[in-house]
Image (spheres, helix red, strand yellow):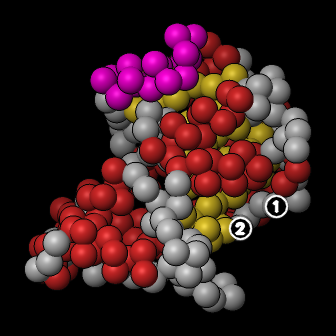
Amino acid sequence: MDLRLANKTALITGGSKGIGLACAVLLRQEGARVAICSRSQANLDAARATLGGDAVCIAADLTDPDAALRAVDEAQAALGPIDILVNSAGAAKRTVPAELNPAAWRAAMDAKYFSYIHMIDPLIKRMAARRAGVVVNVIGNGGKVASPTHIAGGAANAALMLATAGLGAAYAPQGVRVVGLNPGLTATGRVRSGLEAEAALAGGSVAAAEAAAVARIPLGRMAEPEDIARAVCFLASEMAGYITGVTISMDGASVPVVV
């Protein structure tokens, strides 16, 4: 299927590894011009080796709104107006309930919620002025299903789901779509750290935690980053032109609920 993404411009946060990098690779394969953003210059350098030497790679801490705005401006200076924003940055630290405190709650919101909002806010307004654009928020099922080691991060995810719905409705009249995607367990470093936290809470091994997690997935495996990237590219394309203001679960039927 031709997703008609050729010559579109895309900015991917968290684009140096995991789901974000898979999205960047696939968007480039579809003909889009791509910029990626990450806090780590070392990760960006490694991603450039995968994406090609002409890839636009921007180092920025997106928990800082000024740094996020600079990243947006740098991406647009390199590529032109951004047609597609894929938010995949930010990972709230997994914390067992007994160790949660106000600082941990705030850190989770900064790491996940505000890193997304700091990118959405300037870009969605520019998209609205042009009456075109798509924001795809890769969020996570922790916003729907509470996990004992991911309560603060899950709260940030839930807030992003509400922001996605609200912004999707608010900006639809101006030609801008906002869509969320909730991956379940995906074979990334973030999930590995989550399994380590689960194992520590249960007093067992990481291998046992992984086996138990996979056993709860009816499809019988974790998602690969490329599985999520294919859905992101579809949602960013004109083929999904009537989808906005919703968050779609993609968890291998782990949580078989209607809403």
Q: How many marks?
A: 2
Q: Is residue 159 visible?
A: no
- Range shown magenta: 41-56
**Mark 1 packing: few (<14 Cα in 10 Å), some, or many (20+)?**
some
Measuring 34% from the left and 80% from the top, which residue is drawn there? 212
Q: CB of mark 1 within 8 Å of CB of mark 2?
A: yes
Q: Taken as a whole, is the magenta stretch helix, strand or loop?
A: helix
> Which of 30/117 is in front?
30
- 188 lies above or below 59: below
Residue carrying label 2: 246
Measuring 38% from the left and 77% from the top, which residue is drawn there? 213
Q: Tell me the quarter of the image containing the N terminus.
A: top right
Measuring 60% from the left and 32% from the top, which residue is drawn there? 25
- 238 lies above or below 149: above
Q: Position of residue 259 (x, y in %)?
A: 66, 84
- 48 lies above or below 100: above
